[in-house]
């Protein structure tokens, strides 16, 4: 239909053309593709319009989600309590909110790691 709205992040509409990040009230929302059971947790570029992140933990008992939250908190220099998985708790495609971040600061940090979005 019109606008191709995929879903909402933190109550805000997200369009499939927004790329991996969108500004929402109170922060930024990221579309992420997770690859669990990797040798180490790291950024791995872009995949299908999402930020791809390799996670060293297995997808068992929430371990991969916990490691994703720790990884993103370290990457963006924020407390773990400011990182929330809003969608995809049981899947590889996730929608994560970073409270208190601006899109510019997220893009800057990702560019420092060779990812342009």
Image: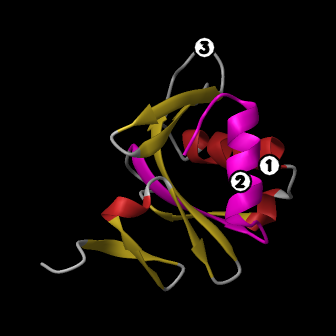
Secondary structure category for the residue under label 2: helix
- Quarter that holds the N terminus: bottom left
Name the element at disc 3: loop
Inter-mark Cα distance, 2 to 3: 25 Å
Number of the label disc, if any, that sits on residue 56: none
Mark 1 neighbour class, 10 Å CA radius: few under 14, some 14 to 19, many 20 or more: some
Is disc 2 surrounded by few (<14), some (14 to 19) or many (20+) residues within 10 Å?
some
* View extreme (left): residue: 1
- Distance of label 1 from label 3 (alpha carbons): 21 Å
- Nearer to the camera, 25 or 42: 25
Name the residue carrying label 2.
106
Q: What residue is disc 3 on?
A: 39
From this view, report whether residue 103 is shown above or below residue 41: below
- Residue plotted at (61% across, 25% down): 56
Start-end of magenta stretch? 92-117
Query: Of marks 2 and 3, which one's residue comes earlier in the chain?
Result: 3
Which numbered disc covers residue 76? 1
Please tell me in which quadrant of the rendered image residue 42 appears.
top right
């Amino acid at each position: 239909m019109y606008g191709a709205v995929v879903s909402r992040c933190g109550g805000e509409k997200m369009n499939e053309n927004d790329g991996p990040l969108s500004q929402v009230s109170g922060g930024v929302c990221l579309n992420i593709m997770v690859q669990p059971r990797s040798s180490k947790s790291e950024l791995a570029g872009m995949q299908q319009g999402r930020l791809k992140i390799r996670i060293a933990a297995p997808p068992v008992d929430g371990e991969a989600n916990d490691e994703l939250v720790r990884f993103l908190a370290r990457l963006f220099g924020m407390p773990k309590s400011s990182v929330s998985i809003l969608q995809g708790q049981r899947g590889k495609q996730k929608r994560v909110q970073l409270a208190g971040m601006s899109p510019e600061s997220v893009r800057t940090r990702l560019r420092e790691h060779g990812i342009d979005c």
